[in-house]
Amino acid sequence: MTSFEVCPLTPTQMDIWVADQRHPDLSQFVLTVSNRMTGPVDRARLVQCFETAVNTQDVFRLQFAEFDGIPGQWLDP
């Protein structure tokens, strides 16, 4: 999938989209995680690590929207 090429959802993504349309106030598919770090942290290196992950792993750049009532997905460049 290339940037800005809108693709259909996978069957699992479609199931989640339908569930969200039926119950938009539920957050059952939202996952939050936190970790406490102790000791010194090299802030610049930590930022670099996150930027590398976002820039190399498609899942972090995947965007979703509805087009004429049909959900789609694409990669943010």
Image (cartoon, rainbow, N blue to C red):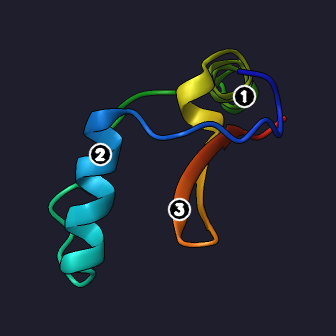
Amino acid type at circle 2 is Ser
Q: Position of residue 65 (x, y in %)?
A: 60, 61
Marks 2 and 3, how far apart in space? 34 Å
Which mark, residue 71? none
Q: Residue at x 34, y 42 (%)?
A: 13
- Is residue 47 at all visible to an observer of this figure? yes
Query: In the rendered structure, are the residues bearing label 2 and label 3 in contact, judged by CB atoms less than 8 Å apart?
Result: no
Amino acid type at circle 1 is Glu
Per the image, the residue denoted by label 3 is 70
Give the quarter of the figure containing the C terminus.
top right
Side of 25 relative to 10 (left or right)? left
Q: Secondary structure at mark 3?
A: strand
Amino acid type at circle 3 is Ile
Marks 2 and 1, how far apart in space? 18 Å
Q: Residues within 10 Å of mark 3 (few under 14, many from 20)?
A: few
Name which of mark 2 and mark 3 comes first in the sequence.
2
Q: Residue at x 23, y 84 (%)?
A: 25
